[in-house]
Image (cartoon, helix red, strand yellow):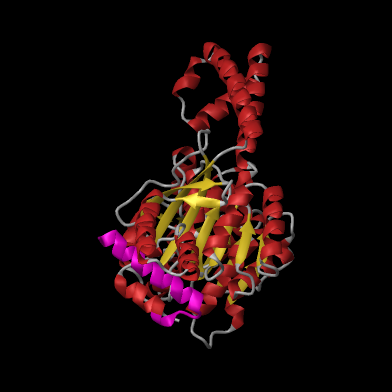
């Protein structure tokens, strides 16, 4: 099924053809990398004038199924099923499939041999390496073992690497050498500005450790400070290294021959992990997420991202009591079939909240999730971009997406999820656990003005109570900043009296803000 391409995709294809149909593409999650690659294959075959074999490598089974659906939607409706082959686990496709999708675990020891055999038979081959940052290290490099032997057939081999976050340094150089140089960089900011992904809002929600957790955090920090001072005396280079290189040097020191330095480095790394784990699993996080969802409701699907399976399971049990049969989980300990069922139910709308750990960061297509909650995460930029990318895919009727980033104040955790930009908005909130509510300074100021007017108008208690309910819900949303047309549309199409009351209240807040 033909789909029009965005301008960035057309520009990228021109660069790819100019680069002899070799190259790597860095593009935001949800901006259309899959459609770009399928159009590249179609146009290449039209130019070459002969049947093209397309080999697609992906890191996970879920992503393999996603590509399978995308190819079926791309091909004419009457195309035979035999055109697409899947290679993972025990599944082996027919050797004459036009499109063959490999999970990397199955591709390592056979893909190179198959590509080489087809090239020697005179068949042109296009290799599409999706999430290609996975293939620059370890055993995954085996998929490129055919490259030194293709010289007689080099003019029939083509490649495209796809990633939202291409690596730099040696890994980046390696990918350029096997797939081709970077031909396109299309980030989230550009995608949002050009509306190839949804506009999005980010809420930073500051949390506080409980008193016993704060005491433990400070004790760990003090011990780490003393140890780090000793390590700097032994290895001054630590002071100037970026975080990743510093960690690698500490690992090296912990395995070194100087026993005193090795023990110090090893203890320092152990305390670093304990402190990070303390912050990541802070008891206030699930409590805040429950309060947040209580304000948001289930009108939009919600993806919750966490780092620890135990934490995800704990939140699942808490929410299951409040929203029976509306919550699902997705993580590595549940098994492939259970994860697939949860994802299918989430996609169909049977469940409205999906709690996931790292397993969902890449390769999962959830185009209709409009809300993301970062229950806990790392400082890695790649993970942040991937998680935002999960909720900003465009879909009919979805005009904005919202990400809520829970972070512990006055700790080593990042307080800002991503830098601000002109196209998207960032809001700073604080969670107040005693009241189980949130502080939103700019919103609270406008709400206080509205409440003062209500007081002067001497409304009935029930009306005042209903306005307070609506104001509480709006504190964690951006509806009060919507334009009059949008708010009036919501008032007119509201499905219940309570929903209509909410939008009437937001309209009053909008007018207060303008005054």
- Whether residue 290 sits left or right of residue 203 in the image: it is right
Judge whether 168 appears above or below 405 on screen.
Answer: above
Tell whether position 494 is magenta. yes
Q: Nearer the viewer, residue 159 or 163?
A: 163
Quarter of image, res 272:
top right
Which residue is rendered at x = 66% and y = 23% of the image? 266
The residue most toward the left is 515
Task: Give whichever of 371, 448 is nearer the camera.
Answer: 448
Residue at x 34%, y 57% (from the top left corner): 449
Q: Is residue 61 left or right of residue 292?
A: right
What's drawn in magenta, residue-wise? 492-515
x, y (%) of residue 187? 38, 54
Q: Is residue 373 above or below residue 506?
A: above
The image quarter containing residue 9 is bottom left
Front in this rendered view, residue 94 or 240: 240
Most extreme residue toward the bottom, as rendered?
78
Q: Relative to residue 10, is residue 491 depicted above or below? A: below
Task: Please indicate, yes or no, whether residue 261 appears anywhere in the rendered image.
Answer: yes
**Figure quadrant of the C terminus:** bottom left
Q: How many marks?
A: 0
Magenta-highlighted stretch: main secondary structure?
helix
Residue 115: x percent and y percent? 57, 61
The percent position of residue 408, horizontal first and vertical second, equals 54, 40
The quadrant holding residue 10 is bottom left
Residue 485 on the magenta segment = no
Location of the N terminus (image quadrant): bottom left
Task: Residue 63 in the image: state x and y as whole percent.
Answer: 58, 63
Along the line of sight, the residue nearer the viewer: 421 or 243: 421
- Residue 391 visible? The answer is no
């Amino acid at each position: 099924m033909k789909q029009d391409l965005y301008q960035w995709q057309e520009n990228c294809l021109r660069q790819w053809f100019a680069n002899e149909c070799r190259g790597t593409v860095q593009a935001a999650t949800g901006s259309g990398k899959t459609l770009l690659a399928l159009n590249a294959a179609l146009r290449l075959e039209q130019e070459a004038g002969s049947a093209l074999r397309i080999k697609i490598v992906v890191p996970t089974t879920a992503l393999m199924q996603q590509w399978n659906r995308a190819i079926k939607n791309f091909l004419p409706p009457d195309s035979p099923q035999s055109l697409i082959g899947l290679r993972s686990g025990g599944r082996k496709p027919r050797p004459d499939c036009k499109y063959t999708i490999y999970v990397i675990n199955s591709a390592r020891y056979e893909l190179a041999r198959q590509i080489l055999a087809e090239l020697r038979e005179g068949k042109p081959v296009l290799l599409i390496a999706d999430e290609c940052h996975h293939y620059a290290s370890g055993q995954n490099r085996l998929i490129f073992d055919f490259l030194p032997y293709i010289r007689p057939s080099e003019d029939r081999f083509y490649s495209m690497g796809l990633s939202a976050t291409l690596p730099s340094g040696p890994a980046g150089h390696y990918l350029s050498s096997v797939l081709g140089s970077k031909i396109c960089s299309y980030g989230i900011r550009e995608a949002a500005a050009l509306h190839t992904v949804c506009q999005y809002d980010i809420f930073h929600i500051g949390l506080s450790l409980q008193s016993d957790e704060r005491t433990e955090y400070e004790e760990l920090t003090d011990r780490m400070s003393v140890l780090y001072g000793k390590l700097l005396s032994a290895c001054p280079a630590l002071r100037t290294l970026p975080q990743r290189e510093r960690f690698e040097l500490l690992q090296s020191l912990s395995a070194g021959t100087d026993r005193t330095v090795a023990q110090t480095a090893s203890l320092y790394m152990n305390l670093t992990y304990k402190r990070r784990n303390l912050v990541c699993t802070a008891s206030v996080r699930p409590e805040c997420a429950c309060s947040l969802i209580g304000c948001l409701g289930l009108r939009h699907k919600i993806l919750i991202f966490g780092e620890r399976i135990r934490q995800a399971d704990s939140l699942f049990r808490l929410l299951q009591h409040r929203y029976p049969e509306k919550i699902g989980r997705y993580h590595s300990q549940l098994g492939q079939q259970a994860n697939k069922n949860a994802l299918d139910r989430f996609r169909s709308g049977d469940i409205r909240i999906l709690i996931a750990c790292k397993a969902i960061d890449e390769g999962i297509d959830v185009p209709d999730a409009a809300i993301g909650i970062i229950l806990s995460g790392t400082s890695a930029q790649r993970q942040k971009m991937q998680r935002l990318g999960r909720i900003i895919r465009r879909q009919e009727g979805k005009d904005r997406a919202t990400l809520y980033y829970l972070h512990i104040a006055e700790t080593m955790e990042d307080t800002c999820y991503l830098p601000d930009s002109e196209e998207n908005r960032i809001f700073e909130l604080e969670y107040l656990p005693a009241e189980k509510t949130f502080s939103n300074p700019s919103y609270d100021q406008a709400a206080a003005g509205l409440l003062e007017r209500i007081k002067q108008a001497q409304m009935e208690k029930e009306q005042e109570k209903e306005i307070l309910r609506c104001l509480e819900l709006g504190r964690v949303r951006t509806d009060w900043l919507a334009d009059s047309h949008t708010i009036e549309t919501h008032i007119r199409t509201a499905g219940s009296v309570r929903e209509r009351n909410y939008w009437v209240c937001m309209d009053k807040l909008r007018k207060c803000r303008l005054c």
